[in-house]
Image (cartoon, helix red, strand yellow):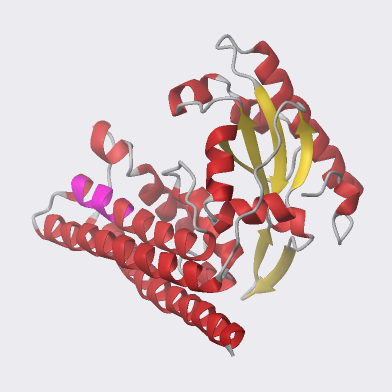
């Protein structure tokens, strides 16, 4: 693991260094102020910025300005695991969002040190990649990361195929339920099942390529993560217009609002549009994930030869 941001192959611009320092300070301060006595052990930058492969792309198509910017991916490691309710009590995301000087979107995941070390030892390559390529922004000095297990393409390919088969089946079940409920004009419940289908397909992608899915039902975050894996997924929800953004927001909100809020409304035409998009996500997920599994198998064959 890198111990300094200066170790990144592609130097970060000064504004990014300032943002990361502020993010680190917010996380440390929130743990110092918390009432649950959780102990912060490590803050690790991982993903595209840690690898020096971040993207900030701005281009114009059909007189529409498009922009894609990589997010900061942050792993917060604590002495013990924290459940989601207590994590939300820390209000870390809210404090970061309030900082207008932080322009880069921030995705934070959190795990206890024991869980993290178990996953590294068990060869979960999402975590082994973090331990190899991550940048340590803060360290309490109380715990060391586990020794990396042997990473073999054959194990990755087997795990990836198992995850793809399982989550694609779940996604297809949700999608078929969506279509049935839509035919019965049960629009809100239909929207929830469409959300679950999309989440299942996103989960397939993340598990095939990284062996890990964060504890999040937020489709916006999941969508950004899969686009960072393969830019082709940007075709599913391009969001080049406000209308496209609003429709995606309807699907994103369906996880909670479609079930519990009486004022949630979605029309037949909106569901049909989103249904087509999720169907496209399904097809692209299967094709791109199978490409990756074939690649892993070929790497294994090459190593044997």
Above-or-below relation of 111 to 251: above
Left or right of 249 on screen, residue 52: right
Q: Is residue 249 among the parts visible in the rendering? A: yes
Above-or-below relation of 273 to 92: below
- Residue 262 horizontal/vertical position (percent): 24, 32
- Residue 253 horizontal/vertical position (percent): 38, 42
What residue is at 61 percent from the left and 76 percent from the top?
62
Q: Is residue 71 among the parts visible in the rendering? A: no
**32 drawn magenta:** no
Of the pair 135 and 226, the residue shown nearer to us: 135
Q: Which residues are magenta?
A: 189-195
Left or right of 139 on screen, residue 201: left
What residue is at 45 percent from the left and 42 percent from the top?
216
Above-or-below relation of 100 to 180: above
Position of the C terminus, as image quadrant, is: bottom right
What residue is at 42 percent from the left and 74 percent from the top?
284
Q: Main secondary structure of the magenta part?
A: helix
Q: Residue furthest bottom?
A: 305
- Residue 301 horizontal/vertical position (percent): 53, 86
- Residue 131 horizontal/vertical position (percent): 68, 50
Of the pair 74 and 41, the residue shown nearer to us: 41
């Amino acid at each position: 693991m890198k111990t300094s941001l200066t170790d990144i192959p592609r130097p970060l611009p000064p504004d990014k260094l300032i943002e990361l320092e502020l993010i680190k300070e917010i996380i440390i301060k929130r743990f110092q102020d918390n009432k649950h006595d959780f102990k912060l052990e490590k803050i690790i930058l991982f993903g595209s910025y840690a690898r020096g492969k971040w993207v900030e792309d701005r281009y114009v198509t059909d007189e529409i300005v498009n922009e894609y910017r990589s997010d900061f991916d942050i792993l917060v490691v604590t002495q013990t695991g924290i459940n989601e309710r207590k994590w939300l009590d820390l209000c870390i995301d809210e404090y970061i969002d309030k900082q207008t000087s932080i322009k880069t979107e921030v995705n934070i995941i959190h795990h206890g040190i024991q869980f993290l070390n178990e996953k590294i030892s068990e060869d979960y390559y999402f975590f082994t990649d973090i331990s190899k390529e991550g940048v340590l922004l803060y360290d309490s000095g109380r715990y060391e990361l586990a020794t990396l297990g042997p990473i073999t393409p054959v194990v990755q390919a087997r795990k990836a195929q198992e995850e793809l088969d399982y989550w694609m089946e779940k996604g297809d079940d949700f999608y078929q339920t969506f279509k049935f409920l839509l035919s019965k004009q049960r629009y809100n419940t239909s929207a929830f099942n469409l959300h679950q289908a999309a989440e299942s397909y996103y989960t397939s992608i993340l598990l095939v390529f990284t062996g890990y899915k964060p504890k999040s039902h937020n489709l916006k975050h999941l969508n950004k993560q899969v686009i960072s894996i393969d830019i082709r997924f940007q075709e599913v929800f391009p969001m080049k217009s406000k209308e496209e953004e609003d429709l995606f927001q309807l699907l994103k909100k369906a996880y909670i609002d479609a079930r519990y809020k009486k004022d949630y409304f979605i029309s037949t035409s909106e569901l049909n549009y989103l249904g087509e998009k999720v169907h496209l996500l399904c097809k692209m997920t299967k094709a791109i994930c199978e490409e990756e599994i074939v690649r892993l198998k070929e790497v294994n064959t090459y190593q044997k030869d």
